């Protein structure tokens, strides 16, 4: 936001300039610059000694100041306090996101699931069926032990254990989108959940 110093040669203008420099060592930035020269060359004479803040040298390029005959407009950069506020807001937002993510992780857990995997008929290659099941890999899924269970008429089904991370694996999605679709459905007719047990919560 621009700071306008009106008529720096009047008493009111000098008072405003003196007040502006009360909390600043220089017109802009943190060292004397050409901005200071631009302001002070607008003064028709040396200010009275009572305006103790209206003093400065000129040693750097400055940040830009516009001087007019009746006013001096100084482009003011954000103060340190303002910059600190923005940084604090960013840090606070990052911490809030981290806390939220951490809380979600703590709510997650693992489950043990027993699946029935049924073949099309007694001619289905059960070894190929098991390979099709175990070929499904995703984060949070771990296949366990399996066994063949007679169903009748020479047909056997496979029961297989798996451990899942609840937030990462949906059993319904696993069955519908992976096991009972190509290429697995060449051997797999259907899958059913036999048992679903929570086994632990993640730290």
Image (cartoon, rainbow, N blue to C red):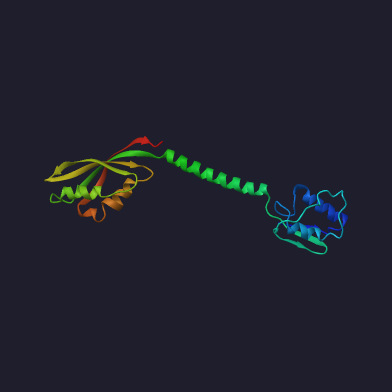
The C terminus, quarter of image: top left
User: Can you name the residue that lies furthest to the left here?
Assistant: 154
Using the image, determine if residue 195 lies above or below residue 179: above
Q: Give the number of callouts.
A: 0
Q: Residue 56, image x and y in percent?
A: 78, 53
User: Can you name the residue that lies furthest to the bottom here?
Assistant: 69
Q: Residue 119, image x and y in percent?
A: 18, 49
Residue toward you, 56 or 73: 56
> For the point 43% across and 41% down, which residue is it?
105
Q: Where is residue 46, by image quadrant?
A: bottom right
> For the point 77% across and 60% down, which residue is it?
38
Residue toward you, 107 or 189: 107
Q: Residue 42, image x and y in percent?
A: 82, 61
Q: Residue 159, image x and y in percent?
A: 22, 42
- Is residue 44 found left or right of 64 in the rendered image? right
Q: Where is residue 67, by image quadrant?
A: bottom right
Using the image, determine if residue 64 lies above or below residue 124: below
Residue toward you, 142 or 190: 142
The N terminus, quarter of image: bottom right
- Is residue 126 found left or right of 106 in the rendered image? left
Q: Where is residue 154, by image quadrant?
A: top left
- Is residue 149 found left or right of 68 in the rendered image? left
Using the image, determine if residue 43 lies above or below residue 138: below
């Amino acid at each position: 936001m621009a700071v306008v110093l009106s008529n720096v040669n009047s008493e009111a203008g000098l008072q405003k300039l003196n007040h502006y420099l009360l909390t600043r060592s220089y017109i802009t930035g943190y060292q004397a610059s050409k901005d200071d020269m631009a302001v002070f060359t607008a003064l028709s004479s040396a200010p009275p000694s009572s305006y103790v803040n209206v003093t400065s040298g000129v040693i750097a390029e400055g940040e830009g100041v516009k001087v007019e005959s009746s006013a001096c407009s100084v482009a003011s950069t954000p103060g340190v306090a303002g910059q600190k506020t923005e940084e604090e807001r960013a840090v606070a937002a990052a911490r809030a996101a981290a806390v939220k993510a951490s809380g979600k992780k703590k709510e997650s857990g693992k489950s043990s699931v027993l699946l029935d995997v049924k073949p099309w008929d007694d001619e289905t290659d059960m070894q190929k069926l098991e390979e099709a099941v175990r070929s499904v890999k995703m984060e949070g899924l771990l296949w366990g032990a399996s066994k063949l269970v007679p169903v009748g008429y020479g047909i056997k089904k496979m029961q297989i254990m798996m451990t899942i991370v609840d937030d990462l694996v949906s059993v319904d999605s696993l069955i519908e989108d992976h096991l009972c679709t190509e290429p697995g459905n060449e051997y797999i007719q259907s899958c059913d959940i036999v048992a679903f047990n929570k086994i632990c919560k993640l730290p």
